[in-house]
Image (spheres, helix red, strand yellow):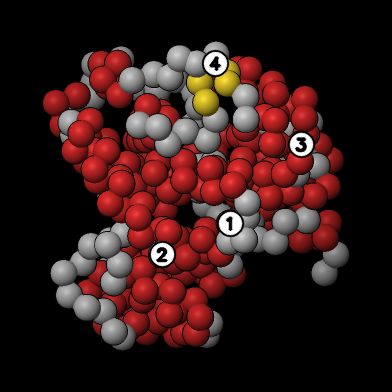
């Protein structure tokens, strides 16, 4: 199958017209287009586990086709990252006990760890923001009435565009990520000047190109927009988690001055219950403990 045929096949799944997708492809930097996709096992796990009638045996067999991937899933299941009280030694039992959404979150974490493995300081800087945002999203998900595991998976990929650009163009992205900015507009402009495309557009395109859910692409493209009541609950949550990660010093870029956690929570729309947000100290400690597992 040719590359263009593959693109058109994916377009049908993402509800883009072929013309729209080809137009976006024409504007994507060449090295970004040639990035390998996320682990195919993780993509299949995401697809299978999204089916409410998912067969656990089938899901287990799919993961076990890649022993290294299966071992990494079990490793993370037993790590402080997810904090389960009992030891998980058999993948099938882990899926039964943890549930489909949690296994989906584990699979996406394994895939993302592999995607950024071997990267330099800039990759680690961006990965730290993505991981912190995902952990924060899971912690505050009840405020937005979104299941924690689902929010974790989507928000983990919210900045995949920036990670993809850094992986593809480290020399061009280095000055972009080393500069202090007064606002987001300046950040996106700097990215476009360096590589012709900003990370929100690149992220949405990558997610569509990899045939991941459309809701993930929406999060990639709009996670920097102001929180609106018309947004889906997941998109509102992703926007909040990204900004909170910045406020807790897990930013991929440096803003001058940086917004505080308290000021961000105070600025949230009235429809959200601000009293349900954890204290800054509690959230900082929660993220610190969880992120320590990513370094193992």
Q: Judging from the image, what secondary structure is the residue with disc 3 in? A: helix
Nearer the observer: mark 4 or 2; the answer is 2
| Residue at image location 33% in from the left, 20% down from the top | 260
Q: CA distance from mark 1 to mark 4?
A: 27 Å
Dot 1 or dot 2: first in sequence order is 1
Question: Could you say where residue 177 lies in the image, as x and y percent from the top left?
Answer: 62, 32
Nearer the observer: mark 3 or 4; the answer is 3
Residue contact between numbered discs 3 and 4, judged by CB atoms under 8 Å: no
Dot 3 or dot 4: first in sequence order is 3
What label sits on residue 296 in the rendered view?
A: 2
Q: Which residue is mark 3?
A: 172
Left or right position of 79 against 46: left
Left or right position of 252 against 239: right
Q: Judging from the image, what secondary structure is the residue with disc 2 in? A: loop
On the rendered image, what quadrant is the N terminus found in?
Answer: bottom right
Task: Looking at the picture, tell me which residue is in the foreground, 8 or 121.
Answer: 121
The image shows residue 160, relative to residue 244, as above or below, that is below
Q: CA distance from mark 1 to mark 2?
A: 14 Å
Q: CA distance from mark 4 to mark 2?
A: 34 Å
| Residue at image location 23% in from the left, 30% down from the top | 280
Residue contact between numbered discs 1 and 2, judged by CB atoms under 8 Å: no
Q: CA distance from mark 3 to mark 2?
A: 29 Å
Dot 3 or dot 2: first in sequence order is 3
Q: CA distance from mark 3 to mark 1?
A: 18 Å
Mark 3 surroundings within 10 Å by alpha-carbon count, few (fewer than 14), some (14 through 19), many (20 or more): some
Q: Can residue 121 be seen in the rendering of this structure?
A: yes
What label sits on residue 183 in the rendered view?
A: 4
Question: Could you say where residue 92 lies in the image, as x and y percent from the top left?
Answer: 32, 83
The image shows residue 238, relative to residue 11, as above or below, that is above
Dot 4 or dot 2: first in sequence order is 4
Residue contact between numbered discs 4 and 2, judged by CB atoms under 8 Å: no
């Amino acid at each position: 199958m040719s590359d263009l045929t593959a693109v058109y096949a994916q377009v049908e799944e993402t509800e883009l017209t072929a013309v729209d997708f080809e137009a976006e492809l024409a504007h994507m930097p060449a090295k970004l287009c040639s990035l390998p996709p996320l682990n195919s096992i993780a993509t299949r796990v995401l697809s299978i586990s999204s089916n409410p009638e998912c067969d656990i045996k089938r899901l287990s067999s799919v993961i076990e086709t890649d022993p290294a991937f299966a071992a990494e899933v079990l490793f993370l299941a037993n790590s402080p990252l997810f904090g389960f009280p009992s030891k998980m030694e058999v993948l099938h039992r882990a899926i039964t006990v943890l549930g489909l959404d949690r296994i989906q979150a584990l699979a996406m974490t394994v895939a993302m760890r592999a995607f950024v493995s071997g990267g330099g300081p800039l990759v680690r800087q961006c990965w730290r923001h993505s991981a912190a945002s995902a952990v924060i999203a899971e912690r505050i998900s009840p405020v937005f009435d979104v299941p924690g595991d689902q929010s974790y998976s989507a928000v983990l990929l919210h900045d995949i565009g920036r990670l993809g650009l850094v992986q593809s163009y480290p020399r061009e992205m280095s000055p972009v990520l080393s500069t202090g900015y007064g606002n987001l507009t300046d950040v996106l402009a700097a990215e476009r000047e360096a590589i012709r495309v900003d990370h929100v557009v690149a992220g949405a395109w990558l997610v569509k190109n990899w045939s991941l859910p459309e809701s993930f692409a929406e999060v990639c493209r709009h996670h920097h927009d102001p929180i609106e009541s018309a947004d889906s609950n997941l998109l509102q949550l992703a926007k909040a988690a990204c900004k909170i990660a910045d406020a807790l010093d897990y930013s991929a870029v440096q803003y001058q001055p940086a917004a505080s956690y308290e000021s961000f929570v105070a600025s949230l729309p009235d429809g959200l219950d601000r009293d349900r947000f954890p204290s800054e100290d509690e959230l900082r400690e929660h993220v610190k403990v969880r992120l320590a597992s990513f370094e193992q």
